[in-house]
Amino acid sequence: MVYVIFSVMAAVIAGLMIKLRMMKKAAREIGTDLTEKIHGDTNTQIRITSRDRDMRALAEKINTQLKDLRREQLRCEHGNTELKNAITNISHDIRTPLTAIYGYLDMMQKTDDPEKQARYLAIMKERADMMKQLTEELFRYSVIVSEEEMESETVFVNQVLAESISSFYPALKAKGIEPEISLTEERIERELNKAALSRVFSNLLNNAVKYSGGDLSITLKDTGEIIFSNTAKGLSAVEVEQLFDRFYTVEAAHHSTGLGLSIARTLIERMGGTIGAEYSDERLTIRIGL
């Protein structure tokens, strides 16, 4: 009887020793793989030979954390690249009018002709206004992204959209754009931030003033979907995908930091809505879902 007990105990101990060795092997595999994954540029997962349920669960949890780490790493790298591009674009946009101001100032100092001086002053003022617009746009963007909370109220969307269109009507007419407007008679009410919604509409209208090929249609549906559509020749699928990226501009010649649509997206998403762009038959369509 004693012999049987000792035999059973020996078998149990042997089994435990084998399991311990297998777990140590799995731990070494996890440790080696983890080091490689952290220091390497790879999306592969940690793999272990052990069939132990707990060790495999541990490996799976580490793989989940590695995925999150990799995602954050890519986001950080993308942010760094975006920041470098932003600094380059902003520096160029500010340096260009500043260089012109210095040039015309020098020319002004070299002439006593009142007409030339007046013309140079007008050009310098135009360039100064351009710099002011750039800096104000950057300031507004920094304020928006730093705000943690956004107060909501019941907003009559039809009215806010109509008021925004009215305020931009002179600018649209000056560009030869007669907007086609179709607003539902259904009263569209949403819990939103009225000032933020007005800013979104203003940014989209301003974008149309700058880049439209001469037309603009604005639709508000019964569902609350809002559609801005205009001719925009020469856009590519890649450019359309990047329209809402910070500091992206389709044409560098248009003096803009490219923050208008990015601000619109940030505000819409903070209010729980959606915004996206489509491009077909040389026509750009921006849809807002509220």
Image: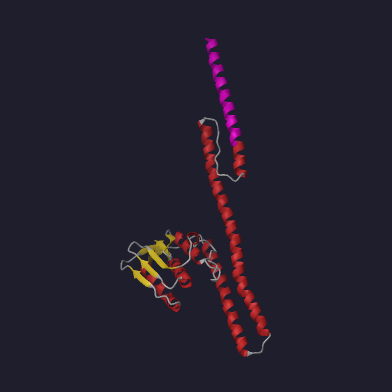
Seen at 52% across and 39% down, the residue is: 61
Count of numbered circles on the image: 0
Residue 149 horizontal side relative to residue 116, left or right: left
Compared to 35, does 143 lie above or below? below
Of 2 and 225, nearer the camera is 225
Q: Is residue 160 visible?
A: no
Verify whether residue 17 appears in magenta: yes
Q: Which residues are magenta?
A: 1-30
Direction left: furthest residue: 185
Of 68 and 113, nearer the camera is 113
Secondary structure character of the magenta stretch overall: helix
Verify whether residue 58 appears in magenta: no
Seen at 59% across and 30% down, the residue is: 25
Which quarter of the figure has residue 95?
bottom right
Query: Which percent across, then down, holds residue 212?
Result: 45, 71
Query: Which percent across, then down, holds residue 83?
Result: 59, 60
